Image: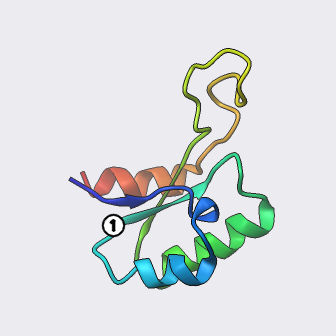
């Protein structure tokens, strides 16, 4: 299996995110509903610096009335998806 650090912005702090990277993570969720453009840039750079593949998603759980309301609100680039698929 592959270990992915999910939604790093929701972790206590970016300093703690960096501390956690001593563990054997394979990827980082860069694209997430709570990540703004600056967050995406920062986490993408951090993932590349630590040789982690990039993932993302809408965090859709199918709960009516709770955002996001549908699939496809947040997309991951074809390049990032290809890198992930190559690891499977």
Percent x, y of residue 52: 41, 71
Residue 33 rendering spot, x and y as whole percentages: 69, 45
Residue drawn where x is 50% and y is 74% of the image? 47
Q: Can you say whether 12 is above or below 81 in the image?
A: below
**Which residue in the structure is indicated by mark 1?**
26
Image quarter of residue 7: bottom right
Which residue is depicted at the point 46% across and 50% down? Answer: 81
The residue closer to the viewer here, 52 or 87, is 52
Element class at badge 1: loop
The quarter holding residue 46 reads bottom right
Identify the residue at image location x=71%, y=57%.
35
In the rendered image, the vertical position of residue 6 relative to residue 69, given as above or below: below
The residue carrying pointer 1 sits among few (fewer than 14), some (14 to 19) or many (20 or more) residues within 10 Å by Cα, namely some
- In the rendered view, tell whether residue 75 sits above or below residue 83: above
Drawn side of residue 71 relative to residue 82, left or right: right
Q: Is residue 48 left or right of residue 84?
A: right
């Amino acid at each position: 299996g592959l270990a992915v650090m999910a939604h790093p912005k929701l972790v206590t702090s970016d300093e703690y995110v960096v501390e956690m990277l001593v563990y054997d993570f394979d990827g980082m969720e860069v694209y997430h509903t709570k990540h703004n453009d600056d967050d995406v840039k920062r986490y993408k750079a951090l993932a590349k610096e630590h040789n982690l593949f990039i993932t993302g998603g809408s965090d859709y759980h199918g709960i009516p009335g709770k955002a996001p309301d549908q699939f496809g609100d947040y997309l991951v680039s074809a390049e990032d998806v290809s890198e992930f698929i190559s690891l499977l």
